[in-house]
Image (cartoon, grey):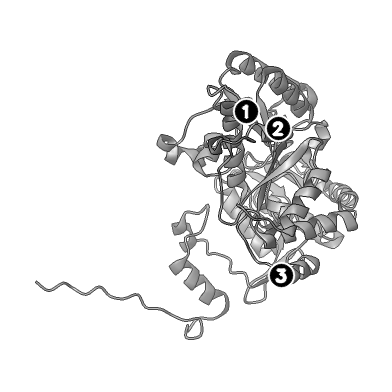
Amino acid sequence: MRRSRQAKPVMISPMSNPLSGNAALLARSLAAVWHPCSQMKHYESFPLIPIARGKGAWLYDHDGKRYLDAVSSWWVNLFGHCNPRINAALRDQLETLEHVMLSGFTHEPVVQLSERLRELAPAGLGHCFYGSDGASATEIALKMSAHYWRNSGKPEKSQFISLQNSYHGETLGALSVTDIALFRDAYGALIRQHSTVPSPDSRIANVGETNAAYALRCAAALERHLQQHHHQLAALIVEPLVQGAAGMAMYHPSYLKRARELCAQYGVHLIADEIAVGMGRTGTLFACEQADITPDFLLLSKGITGGYLPLSVVMTTDEIYQAFYADQTARGFLHSHSYTGNPLACRAALATLDIFAQDDILNTNRSKTAYLNTIAKPLREHPRVRNFRNTGMVWAFEADTPHADFAQRCFTLGLQQELLLRPIGKTVYFMPPYIIEEEEIKILVERTLGIVEALA
């Protein structure tokens, strides 16, 4: 019996493709790339945006149209696309060392980065463990916390708690402390279930209740949970000050301060997930600074390399480090990634820290924040805008609109107005690169106001 021959896929080279510019790249991408956080069929109605290059706060397609990157390319880009200083650092590193495994070896960029982070981070965080992305950092911290308790003779402390509507990544461990059904539900059978406690999200406060008072009310609920369950709890994990995927839910630092006190009282680790909110995004280099606390674990990623290369860091204390320091291999923390502490990524991070120091970025950002808040008055006071709020270089508001598909409509209208906006439900947010100029801020605010009015 003859087997039928399967037709071989036709390979179309970019040079022979009859399409050109945006259309050519779009066709090739849809044929070969499975895009993240996407229902691929939707791209039949809402095409991908092919990007040819970036410069400063702008992205450009193959046909010359530009888009103001108001979301820092998923919250990672701090100092603009193709930043000449980060570019120069990477070119220099390429001539020295591109990669070496970090197990049994070390190199200058990873040592220097660890030393500088130790100097900058809240006091007591002196040890850096490296991963490749934010979810990896969450996995590392969860494993390290539970393993610490095991090494300390308390293996029963293996449960975790997180805030309602929290987001900590989409690998299985990270999903177990993520409280967003869209990401979790399909994998429920694979995920270990953990508990949540009320979010101090200031939008939920009662009428007349201050943000600080509501935060402390939520902290009281946390205390009740710790009283009942601390014997089984390894750690509480939180996104300090801003819960990103919850719609930029912002809350008062008093919650963090009280959570730190309670975790210490009940013998539960505090994991501060600053993957999105660290590196100056909330107005201080680390969000925890605003509560004057040191967590047991501090997680960094996204902006740490200026948005250039994948890198994540888990910083922890000497007490936790010492619990793994022993003759027995099994007491060690054996988690690993092939590209752990990659020299190129570390060099990009060092260049990013140089820019913070040399350009006084935090003070400059305060001026830009004040400017945006001033010119945003018509947007803030628009009858269709609710809960206009700001923390550092993050702004958000809810649109009072009848359109169930508001997010997609806003995204589409934004592109037509040269804006890259990516609403979360009916929450519109700005998280621009720190190099955004006043004229670009004006474009962002005024055109967003026009979009709100068009969708009212």
Residue at the spot of label 2: 296
Residue located farthest toward the front when viewing the structure as drawn: 327
Q: Earlier in the sequence, mark 1 or mark 3?
A: 3
- Position of residue 285 measured from the top left corner of the image (x, y, whole percent): 81, 45
Crowding at dot 1, Cα within 10 Å, few <14 / some 14-19 / many 20+, comes out as many
Identified by mark 3, the residue type is Thr
- Residue shown at 43%/80% (left/top)? 12
Identified by mark 2, the residue type is Asp
**Is disc 1 in contact with disc 2, using a CB cutoff of under 8 Å?**
yes
Give 324 or 56, whichever is nearer the viewer: 324
In 3D space, how far apart are the residues under numbered discs 1 and 2 (Cα atoms)? 9 Å
Identified by mark 1, the residue type is Ala
- Position of residue 320 measured from the top left corner of the image (x, y, whole percent): 68, 32
Asked if residue 307 can be seen in this view, the reply is no
> Does residue 187 sit above or below 79 in this rendering?
above
Q: Secondary structure at mark 3?
A: loop
Q: Secondary structure at mark 1?
A: strand
Crowding at dot 3, Cα within 10 Å, few <14 / some 14-19 / many 20+, comes out as few
Looking at the image, residue 9 sits to the left or right of residue 191; the answer is: left
Looking at the image, residue 1 sits to the left or right of residue 56; the answer is: left
Give 27 or 152, whichever is nearer the viewer: 152
- Residue shown at 46%/35% (left/top)? 191
Q: Earlier in the sequence, mark 2 or mark 3?
A: 3
Give 186 or 411, whichever is nearer the viewer: 186
In 3D space, how far apart are the residues under numbered discs 1 and 3 (Cα atoms)? 40 Å
Residue located farthest toward the bottom when viewing the structure as drawn: 16
Residue at the spot of label 3: 96
Residue at the spot of label 1: 235
In 3D space, how far apart are the residues under numbered discs 2 and 3 (Cα atoms)? 35 Å
Q: Earlier in the sequence, mark 1 or mark 2?
A: 1
The mark closer to the camera, 1 or 3, is 3
